[in-house]
Image (spheres, rainbow, N blue to C red):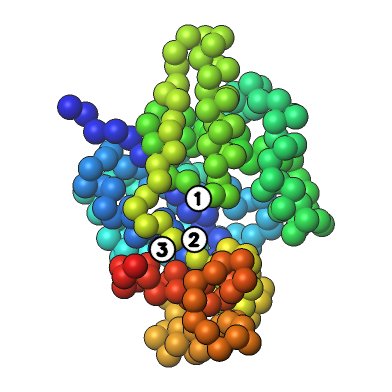
Amino acid sequence: MSKKVILSGVQSTGNLTLGNYLGAIKNWKKMQEDYECHYMIANLHTLTIRNDPEKLRSNTLNLLALYIAAGIDPEKSNIFIQSQVASHAELAWVLNCFTYMGELSRMTQFKDKSTKHADNINSGLFTYPVLMAADILLYQADLVPVGEDQKQHLEITRDIAERFNGIYGKTFKIPEAYIGENAARVMGLQDPTSKMSKSSVIPNDSIFLNDEPDEIMKKFKKSVTDSENIVRFDVKEKPGISNLISIYSAITRKK
């Protein structure tokens, strides 16, 4: 019996955060034992913002090294750099012709990124979900690990695939969401209402995988909590404390 196919990836912008590891890569190591896994370094997706070419190249290779260091075995999983597989961009163009402007304009990530990068609202930012759809459909993925903020992208991928199949016959598999075991959603240490980000400009907001141990401890000690002298899990009322509890639970595997 053939294994089900999984496709996932991380953008090669900046260093990987603890959020990237706990929310995704930690589970990749487990998945490669049971699935046919394709893990990409999504450097084409980074082009929606302006990058220094040398830094982008360095980040791409560093990310490859971190994949392997985190336990992704090249003998068990297909690890690749997105831009080195021309079919991603080629299929994205084809799928663009089967995607409607109204669908793309409703994507919440486009609205969010347009606000953050108001000086560079380019068409790539708008059609970003189509390239993501091409990534997934190209490998006939059965499952795609997605966080809460990416569910819309999987939904539009399914819509595009079903539309294409309806016209040309069964061409693409319709992918399903893969919800990983204990997939943690790690928030920023200084802004616990926003997801920990590689591109955060807030000092001490993100823990990076290549941070020194002393630096990591300093960042945790400076993390935002609240004025109440009680430790309890309450995301709405105590987001800082709740975030630290979630991180501790994900690392120690304690409930």
**Circle 1: is it few (<14), some (14-19), or many (20+) Cα within 10 Å?**
some
**How far from the left and from the top, in percent, is residue 75?**
21, 48
* Mark earlier in primary sequence (2, 3): 3
Amino acid beneath label 2? Arg
Q: Indicate left or right for 192 with 145 as reference.
A: right
**Circle 3: is it few (<14), some (14-19), or many (20+) Cα within 10 Å?**
many
The alpha-carbon separation of the residues under discs 2 and 3 comes to 10 Å
**Would you name the residue on which mark 2 appears?**
185
**How far from the left and from the top, in percent, is residue 1?**
17, 27
**How far from the left and from the top, in percent, is residue 44?**
56, 46
**Would you name the residue on which mark 1 appears?**
147
Judge depth for marks 1 and 3 and give the one in front: 1
Residue 217 in which image quadrant:
bottom left
Question: Which residue is depicted at the point 59% across and 53% down?
Answer: 46
**Would you name the residue on which mark 3 appears?**
21
The one of 74 and 86 positioned closer to us in this rendering:
74
Q: Indicate left or right for 105 with 21 as reference.
A: right
The alpha-carbon separation of the residues under discs 2 and 1 comes to 8 Å
User: Do callouts 2 and 1 mark residues in contact (Cβ within 8 Å)?
Assistant: yes
